[in-house]
Image (tube, helix red, strand yellow):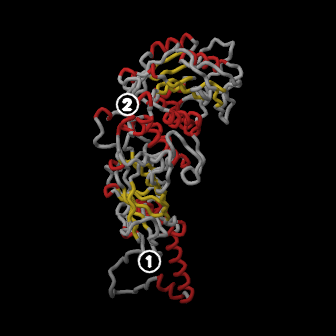
Amino acid sequence: MASSTAYSRPSKPPGPVAGDRRGPRLAKELGRIEPKKLGIGLVAGCCLALLTYLSFARLFAIYSPVFDSSALVLKNAPPATTTVPATEAPPVQPKTEVEQKDVTDPEVDPNLANLPEATRKEELKEAPATKPAAAATEAKITCDENGVDEGFPYARPPVCELAGDIRISPKEKTMYFVNPSGAGPFDANGEKKIRPFARKDAFLLPGVVEVTIKSVSSAEAAPQCTRRHGVPVVVFSVAGYTDNFFHDNTDVLIPLFLTTAHLKGEVQLLITNFKPWWVHKFTPLLKKLSNYDVINFDKDEEVHCFRAGHLGMYRDRDLIISPHPTRNPHNYTMVDYNRFLRRAFGLPRDAPAVLGEETAAKPKMLIIERKGTRKLLNLREVSSMCEALGFAVTVAEAGADVRRFAERVNAADVLLAVHGAGLTNQIFLPTGAVLVQIVPWGKMDWMATNFYGQPARDMRLRYVEYYVSEEETTLKDKYPRDHYVFKDPMRIHGQGWPAIAEIIMKQDVMVNMTRDAEDTIPVDAGVESSPSTTLSAPLVDLSVNDVSEVDTSHLGATMSILQEVLRSAENPVVP
């Protein structure tokens, strides 16, 4: 009869049968084993099976999509903050994924549709959810809103700096600030309203979007984050006179540089009064200041969360950056701004051409042409005269293509223009180049000096002012010579900007290239950064080594002296 085991089917169905019935062998063998040894063996076997299972389960878990989803949830969980009590759970994050938003404005002019992106593609940096609560930023807010500059009343706009749990809802025009202590510059409703425009101008401010900083006691009182950023934020406006190159720089770009340059691109920009064409125009500069796409504050519907930021920007005088412990703690200068512009636009020249008396090379002069007011009526004659004196002259009008015109200016050794926004292009000149400003009639000394003259000195340019006479202005065709326009032009200034704009700013000039010499006045116009000379008024800062009385009473003499200065072997360019 075939034998049977516990692992084989019996040869016959169970039950009483004739003949011998053999009992199961395994049962008999187990019966001989001591109970103690049997228990130890079973335990060891179970442990071995469990170990084998766990090993395979670990491999499975590593590659499991369930594990990946869990990690994503953890990654997007709100970080712990000092503003949420330790006993409270942080607010639940409603999304498990962070969408990359296209910040292109939906109402952009179709003509701009194929233009390059305004700023770099944003790579969202998330604050890790596993960061300990103790490492979170303490809630802090500081507002600078009482600064006064008697000479420039619009030069100290309000700006607030925040740190902590900051949640920005552009749709509500509100920055929620989780602030358990309630301390800060808030009104009775726990709010602080700011128009984040870097020009404290009562005429312009009503047109600037007002943003409210709202102090809330806990995270639950603020909207939940839909988008987290691991970099600081700056919220600012491009309202006002933007579209005028002077104001583009004084009211937006220089303040933005002053506020963000030290962050080396690690900052998110939110722009109110958003202008797609303006963002496109200054794309190279915005890219250089921020590594992320700008966000249109006027259209965005997310709730953006940050750990630090500014509402508004720091601002100094026009085209001027001065040392200041709060507004300029990094001690930036206009020379730093010039270098920033060269890098952003890829401008190659840091210094003008070195011309000696023996070289045949000609210094390059760029004359900026104006088509509206303050035109140089005899521009062709001036250009021909300068060419006859040895300059290589180019005449051009500043246009919308900032990079292209910046390249033209950077290629010049001398920039000449009548007083106006075109002179702002001096920011692209190589350090040590020459700026020549033709100043119209009407006691324009203060404007000429503070808007363009002093900035030129701060940029370490050599600066020349040429003041026109009564005979060189078209005002002589509108007003008699005994009118206060000629007898007492300061009366125009006393009537305010509308009168200045209507009378002085609307004149044209026709410079006399051979007018009789007037009395010359020795003027020592030394600049600390370079040797200087005495030139007769109205010229200053031509940086040669001798002091002499020279005839600069007409533009021809001025250009002749300038040519000699540029060719002087004793006139090295100060780097």
Q: Quadrant of residue 34?
A: bottom right
CB-based contact (under 8 Å), mark 2 and mark 1: no
Q: Is residue 64 visible?
A: no
Label placed on residue 5: 1
Image location of residue 187, percent across then percent down? 39, 66
Element at label 2: helix
Residue 520 shown left or right of residue 157 in the figure: right
Residue 403 shown left or right of residue 372 in the figure: right
Q: Is residue 83 visible?
A: yes
Image location of residue 210, percent across then percent down? 35, 54
Name the foreground residue: 164 vs 162: 162
Name the foreground residue: 277 vs 41: 277
Question: Looking at the image, which residue is at 69% across and 25% down?
Answer: 547
Question: Looking at the image, which residue is at 34% across and 79% down?
Answer: 12
Q: Split into 4 quadrants, where in the image is the C terminus? A: top right
Q: Quadrant of residue 96?
A: bottom left
Question: Looking at the image, which residue is at 46% across and 66% down?
Answer: 184
Q: Residue furthest top?
A: 388
Residue bearing the label numbered 2: 503
Question: Looking at the image, which residue is at 46% across and 47% down?
Answer: 153
Image location of residue 442, percent across then percent down? 45, 30
Label 2 CA crowd tier, 10 Å (few <14, some 14–19, many 20+): some
Q: Split into 4 quadrants, where in the image is the N terminus? A: bottom left
> Spatial distance from mark 2 to mark 1, Cα to Cα?
120 Å
Label 2 amino acid? Ile
Q: Is residue 291 above or below residue 463?
A: below
Q: Is residue 83 above or below residue 256?
A: below
Image location of residue 234, percent across then percent down? 45, 51
Name the foreground residue: 23 vs 1: 23
